[in-house]
Image (cartoon, rainbow, N blue to C red):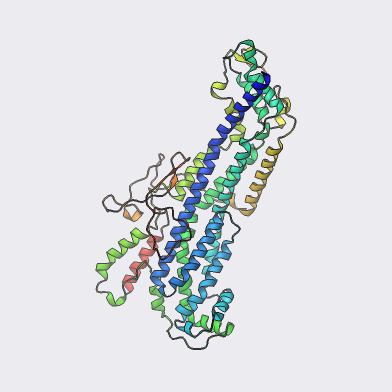
Amino acid sequence: MEESYQLAVKRETLHNIQSYSYELEHLISGHSDAFHDMFQYLLSFSQGHLSSLLEGSYSAVSRQTLPHVNQLFSSLSLYLRGANVSVEAAVHQFFNNIFPLVYMRLINPGIEGSMMGNEMGDCLRMTRQDVNPFGPHPDVMAQKLAGALGAGRQLVLALEEGLEVMNVTQHASLSKECVKGLVKMVYCSHCRGLTLIKPCVGYCLNVMRGCLASVSELDQPWRRYTSLLEQLTHGMAGHHSLELALLGVRENVNEALLYAQLHGPLITATVDKVCGLSTSEPTGTQPTSTEVATSTVTSSSPLPSAASSQALPEQWPGQIAHLRNSFPLKPSKNNKHSLRTLSREFLVYLQRYKSFFAALPEMMCDGENVVDDSTCWGGDGVLQSYNGKVVGIGVHAQRQNPEVKVRTVDPSMAEVKERLEHFNQETQEKFPKLDQMDPWDELGSGETEEGSTTDCDDEDGCQASGDGQEKESHEVVSSEGLGRVPGGDNPQVNPSRPPSVRVIGGLPSVSWNFALLFAGLCLQWILF
């Protein structure tokens, strides 16, 4: 009978531990998947954004550069997943690969036919960083991406580490002393015919704190871990850092190509000295500064030229409307499924579990499991109140526990504690200024405490109710934070340009760059 009670109480206790741990585990895993999907979506959008620039303004090199664009964003995707990939190396490899195309098709159009084999291309790729045809823009792009994506990558790794901790916790072992104390607390009263009486609160706390002493040792490293999660989330999503960095790829590449065109003669002279393979004069002509300036304003279709200025006023509203609908680069104030909103939701739920491992014994002694009145079970009989000393949490505090003897720390718990401490230290070393980052405002402009937003117009990225366009959505974490809500159809993509990363769907929450783009379009109209 005693063995049956031991098996029953052990099974019930482990089930309760797993039930409480499951909520936290599901919170971490659900948001880990949601962040991953959001990252993939932002990468896909940024990739399409860059491809549209190349097709619309640099058609001479667009087709040949698309494989290199795919390679760049595939590397960034792998980096965000935790793979051993260098963002800086991926960016510089991208510019190394496109330099031969830029040199032979933009700087010196027509020179490609005079080259023998791949010697010129190989030389240009190997000497790109020495020739520096793109100015400071590759380094700027690499630094921005490495900074913003680094926090996102570390957040993904941190969530994976949290899942490992929860997995070990759910399978925590119970010592013989613990099982003995549990049987005494739960079933010994049955031997006296007291099948309905409940344990005293203080008595239950002593038993549970003794049983979960090794688990409670995770309290301090776990609190530090959750603080790092908050800081990583702020560093990634605060001020739209990751979104702006990915969206800025288009602008950085455009500036790099313009720099190469403007400095074409100097680049050509340097290449002739370094590679010495130029055998004939280029058949094309160097672009003038006016022609280069024209390409600073880009869209998915070529802008009207100066010769067609007569028709410009009629075409302009449609051009602007097309850009607004295709690239809503200003974050929508009522977009509840942006990276920023997802991050805020995650932090709200995370706050509830900062003290999870310290509070777990109390959760086990909560509700209908115990009573705190004049008649409760105290282990040896019915008591009016429990008079024993209620000890604290952790192995050290159990020396004075009158109910459960704790001799050593569970080896599995000691290992996971050491692993979590090592991860915290490693994260702090990688991001020494992480705790100095200012968190975003709790409520941005136009938001209320209930999470609602003020009305917005089309310029804010909102779709008017009468515009006749269907609203799009994508997979996001639900309001409970524990599941996904499937969205609508994926946006259409060019079949000739297969993306290297998966599109989740919908419109992104992106930056205010549309205002800059609009200003550039207006300036172009005035000049030409």
Where does the image place residue 336, in percent across and percent down from the top left?
Answer: 41, 46
- Picture residue at 44% right of the left edge, 62% below the top: 498
Q: Nearer the viewer, residue 207 or 388?
A: 207
- Picture residue at 53% right of the left edge, 70% below the top: 95
Outermost residue to the right? 407
- Picture residue at 48% right of the left edge, 51% below the top: 37
Q: Nearer the viewer, residue 432 or 467?
A: 467
Q: For the C terminus, which image quadrant?
A: bottom left
* Quadrant of res 166: top right
Q: Nearer the viewer, residue 171 or 360?
A: 171
| Residue 350 in view, yes or no | no
Where does the image place residue 207, in percent across and percent down from the top left?
Answer: 66, 24
Q: Nearer the viewer, residue 152 or 84?
A: 84
Q: Is residue 384 left or right of residue 37?
A: right
* Quadrant of res 410: top right
Q: Is residue 136 above or below residue 483?
A: below
Where does the image place residue 383, in percent across and percent down from the top left?
Answer: 63, 13
* Quadrant of res 12: top right
